[in-house]
Image: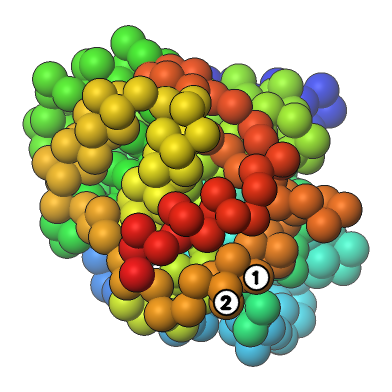
Amino acid sequence: MQIDVNLKEKSYKVFIDELKTIKLDTKVAVVTNPTVSALHVETLLSKIDARECHVITVPDGEKYKNFETLNQILEECFELRLDRKSVLIALGGGVIGDMTGFAASIYQRGIDFIQVPTTLLAGVDASVGGKTGINNKYGKNLVGTFWQPRAVYCETAFLKTLPKREFNAGVAEVIKMAVTFDKDFFEWLEKNSLHVEENLQYAIRECVKIKADVVSRDEREEGVRAVLNYGHTFGHVIENETKYTTYLHGEAVSIGIVMANKLALEIGLLSQSDEQRVKILLEQYDLPITYAIKSVEKFYDSFYLDKKSFNQKIKFILPSTIGGYAIKDDIKKETLLKVLREFV
């Protein structure tokens, strides 16, 4: 199946289970990590028809999503004498995709890159839309660019090697999209397990359709695309507080979804029954729904580093119902602190 991301001259296709041959008349470098390389790099290399093809291997893990690793990718690109016609291919999860895209966007002022996601989280969300970046001590993805890929190849076969925890973390992003954009899809998720292959393929297609439509309407997150950050404003603080070592990204998003729903419930935006339905669905995939905040004031202050915040106003993406959303930037500090105290 092919899904179009319509961005005029920057448009591209997301190919779902259609990876046959990637033909590129240029030098190519595949960026991956040791874990993914051992599982999938030979399969990918057998699909690439290029003038030259090299592999750049970087350390595995969110804690390596930083300037040091970015510089390693760039230095290896120079060592390989890649030029402005060369192409980088990201083979991995969201970390690899974000860093490869960022490197591509700044190498010789910008070269093409292709996304080949190997995690559910990357396949349904991170690989589509052109957000690239790295983390620093102030927070997650605070340094980066918008740089659209040349194409995305999402193969469900690559997902079969995922550990259960990693797979479930990706489900959090699936649930995120259903809650905010598609009531029917959410109700379908309540009845169908994503551990069944045909159900998984259907869910990936639905998520990519949602993401492609949102990105086509709002490439640079000036409006509706911000809704895709549902759960992330809270989740990013959790990841930063725990130094990216305690939770996978999707697990932090799961907790963030629960926190966002508590806030929506507190201000009368979301019903208690809908709040419970979302929590039950997260628990079906063993996703965490609790977090012990050490300092409520410090947690609150961290919100101001969120990329959606503007003019000293914190912007929250909240569900108004299953399949609906609201963007709020007028929530009082006292209300936020009250909700945060529920997680002390």
Q: Position of residue 29 (x, y in %)?
A: 59, 66
Q: Residue at 41%, 63% (x, y): give it.
A: 341
Q: Residue at 75%, 30% (x, y): give it.
A: 223
Q: Amino acid at mark 2?
A: Lys
Q: Relative to the observer, which residue lies in front, 109 or 317? A: 317
- The local secondary structure at tag 2 comes to helix
What scheme was used to colour the molecule? Answer: rainbow
Q: Relative to the observer, which residue lies in front, 122 or 343? A: 343
Q: Which mark is residue 206?
A: none
Q: Relative to the observer, which residue lies in front, 23 or 89? A: 89
Q: Amino acid at mark 1?
A: Asp
Label 1 to label 2: alpha-carbon separation: 5 Å
Q: Position of residue 268 (x, y in %)?
A: 47, 27
Q: Residue at 27%, 60% (x, y): give it.
A: 290
Residue 81 visible, this orientation: yes
What residue is pinned by disc 2?
298
Q: Relative to the observer, which residue lies in front, 82 or 313? A: 313
Do residues under tags 1 and 2 come within 8 Å of each other at their CB atoms? yes
What residue is pinned by disc 1?
301
Dividing the picture into quadrants, the one containing residue 224 is top right
Tell whether 286 sits left or right of 220.
Answer: left
> Pointer 2: residues within 10 angstroms few (<14), some, or many (20+)?
few
Image height of 284 relative to 94, above or below: above
- The local secondary structure at tag 1 comes to helix
- The extreme top residue here reads 184
